[in-house]
Image (spheres, helix red, strand yellow):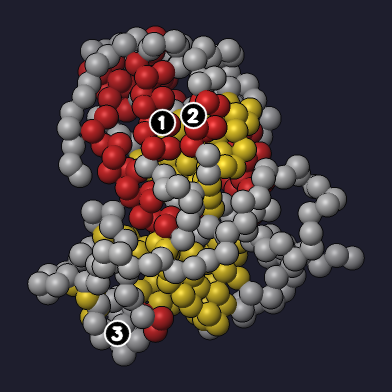
Amino acid sequence: MALAGLVAAAAFVLAAKQGPVREQSETVARPKKKGEPPAEEKKIPSKFGKKDRPDVPAGVPTFRSDVTAVSVDVAVLSNRGQFIPGIPRGNFRVLEDGVPQQVTSFSMGEAPMTVCLVIEFSNLFQHYWGETWYQTLTAAYGFVDTLKKEDYVAVVAYDMRPEMLSDFTTDRQATHEAMQRLRIAAYSESNLFDAVTDTAQRMSEIEGRKAIVLISSGIDTFSKLTFDKTRKILQEAGVPIYAIGLMQALREWYDARGAMGSIQRLDFLQADNQLRTFTKETGGQAFFPRFYGEFPGIFRAISEALRNQYSIAYNPSNQARDGKYRKIKVELVNPANGEALRITDEKGKPIKYTIVAKAGYTAPREVE
């Protein structure tokens, strides 16, 4: 794959800048009051577990376990990426394989985040002091600097294989010291599938609100896993992925000058599609910044989606233990007529919104 030519330096910086539900038929989003305390939620700063570890205690909740209830974390975001609070329980409708489900518990709150930062750091693109090297580090350090002191973060870098640079910690100095190792890339492989599945499987043992923030080109060169197998593993792990796609402006710069071939162009389009698929199916979001000025807004959107959520649980009507994948869809409706909920701001103007939730889960399989 003749992609090495895309690592030449290209400077581009542009400042970028980066709303309220009353009755159940029309909701006015109430902005969070300054100084309002966050809802308490138990946080377990678990370390990365070894897969198939015999000492994992029974009953640790995962999306794959033998469950009688299914939990879904839902974020409702405005078109500006802001979390919309104050939506009543009765306006949420959960469908499993198209069948409405009975919600058994519902809550909304703000809590610390448990995030693993998964960073592509390969000699394929991240040449020392190259444009993509600089963009990668800008995104990684910039995201860490937006975390609150109670947030837990781990750092994993990958090329041929994933390497854990630091375990989950609230010590920002330890995190920055670990990221100092991101200087000279070693291998020219970029095995995205292996890295993201390994991380998601290990994080499936962690309780509380968790997510993977993936900083990557989306290119996979030589993973052992296929794309379809990777999708299945990520769906089963149930860890939301928020992806920041690299090299967007650089690709456009080369393409406009005829320096990118048709195969390279298709490779990058496929890479973007892979990131969109992984994020959509796990209940996350994908961002493709062209300018450095977009990073603060992206970090803010990720924080809004992760830190503020509606937690919904239901007992699935389909109790078959067949090990099959079940699709989940969360909707906002007016219970009086079943139509889509209309949300307005404080001035009565309608707000366009997006519902972010897991796309499904894998049912337990009966052990013979």
Residue 237, placed above or below residue 271: below
Q: What residue type is labelled 3?
A: Gln
Q: Which amino acid does label 1 sit on?
A: Tyr
Q: For the residues marked 1 and 3, what is the alpha-carbon distance in whole angstroms?
A: 42 Å
Q: For the residues marked 2 and 3, what is the alpha-carbon distance in whole angstroms?
A: 46 Å
Q: In which quarter of the image is the C terminus?
A: bottom right
Q: Tell us which disc is closer to us: 2 or 1.
A: 2
Q: Mark 3 points at which residue?
A: 24
Residue 152, placed above or below residue 3: below
Q: Which amino acid does label 2 sit on?
A: His
Q: Where is residue 243 in the image (x, y as percent from the top left)?
A: 43, 40
**Res 130 → quadrant:** top left
Residue 3, placed above or below residue 345: above
Viewed as shown, does residue 247 lie left or right of 350? right
Residue at the extreme right of the image, as rendered? 368
Q: Tell us which disc is closer to us: 1 or 3.
A: 1
Seen at 39% across and 37% down, the residue is 145
Viewed as shown, does residue 141 lie left or right of 249? right
How many numbered tags mark residues here? 3
Q: For the residues marked 2 and 1, what is the alpha-carbon distance in whole angstroms?
A: 8 Å
Residue 324 visible to an observer of this rendering = no
Element type where label 2 sits in the image: helix
The local crowd at label 1, few if under 14, some if 14 to 19, many if 20 or more residues have their Cα within 10 Å, is few
Element type where label 3 sits in the image: loop
Viewed as shown, does residue 237 lie left or right of 296? right
Q: Name the residue under label 2.
A: 176
Going from N to C along the chain, the mark reached first, 2 or 3, is 3
Q: Name the residue under label 1.
A: 141
